[in-house]
Image (cartoon, rainbow, N blue to C red):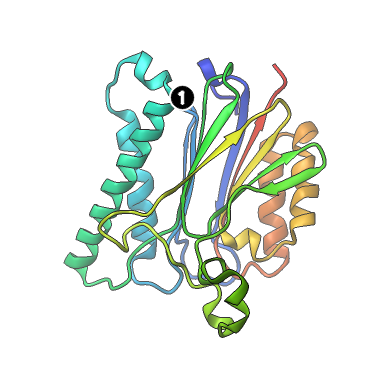
Amino acid sequence: MTASGSYRHLVYAGLTDIGRARQRNEDALLIAPDHAVFGVCDGLGGAEGGREASRIIVDTVAEALARPALPAAMRSHAYRTLLVVQALGEAGRRIRLHAARHGHRGMSSTATFLMFSSLGERRATLLHAGDTLAFRLRGDRMQRLFEPHNMETEFREAAGDLPPHMRHLLTRAIGIREHEQLEPTPVDVAPRDTFLVASDGLTNMVEPLRIAEILSATRTEGPEATARRLVHEANEAGGRDNITVIVVHCVAA
């Protein structure tokens, strides 16, 4: 699919899959092409209410983007970024309220949202909490755009002293704290860049070099074929978790 208006330089596709081991899909995705906002959320594995948490986040952000606003405001990258920040804060409040009403301890979700500026600006912003990762493929080089929020990252050089089962425990997620700890990451955008936002059902199952190889075909095959191939690859590797991917390619025009 191709985004419209000021974002017609973006072609995109998204796909979510239950995988081969889980009984339900706790991932959720949001694609808002009219506003160039793309998000993937992963309800915490094993936590009660994970599926509801990820769905609350994408529904709350979609609701915020759908509210009437002046066209000039919605074309402003700063305004749309602030809108998503506020929506994620509201989503966290709704998750905590839902958890209290239904007795879901630990109900929360990762969230990674990628927001592009208009055609002329060539930049983007990532807002993220947790370990749902984002990548940029430029030429032959794939770059992870931020570090995951987990114990291994927090402890850095001392992470080797942690028990293996603790290294990937999350230190941030939407719904855990009263004030959401979002990390903003500015990203520059160039023609022919390809971006990937993916839950750990992909990144824990497929090696980075293989992901980069599949992403490189986006330039000729398009994002939809790439998204299907990434999900297929994760399932072929065992599909031990839900798999959600969004692929966004920036055309040369």
Q: Considering the image in quadrants, where does the C terminus appear?
A: top right
- Count of numbered circles in the view: 1
Nearest the eye: 135 or 29:
135
Give the x, y percent position of residue 109.
40, 59
Give the x, y percent position of residue 22.
52, 70
Residue lying farthest to the front in this orientation: 157
Is residue 58 in view?
A: yes
Give the x, y percent position of residue 218.
74, 37
Q: Is residue 145 left or right of residue 74?
A: right
User: Dot 1 surroundings within 10 Å: few (below 14), some, or many (20 or more)?
Assistant: some
At a point 53% along the width and 56% down the height, the residue shown is: 132
Nearest the eye: 147 or 244:
147
Q: Considering the image in quadrants, where does the N terminus appear?
A: top right
- Relative height, residue 4 to residue 25 (above, below): above
Q: Amino acid at mark 1?
A: Asp
Q: Is residue 17 left or right of residue 73?
A: right
Is residue 28 in view?
A: no
- Relative height, residue 124 to residue 42 (above, below): above
- Relative height, residue 250 to residue 204 (above, below): above
Indicate the quadrant where residue 13 lies. top right
Give the x, y percent position of residue 104.
27, 71
Residue lying farthest to the left in this orientation: 101
Q: Is residue 210 left or right of residue 235?
A: right
Indicate the quadrant where residue 21 lies. bottom right
Residue at numbered disc 1:
34
Q: Is residue 54 left or right of residue 115?
A: left
Nearest the eye: 109 or 186:
186
- Relative height, residue 70 to residue 49 (above, below): above
Task: Give SS at disc 1.
Answer: loop
At a point 43% along the width and 74% down the height, the residue shown is: 46
At a point 24% along the width and 65% down the height, the residue shown is: 99
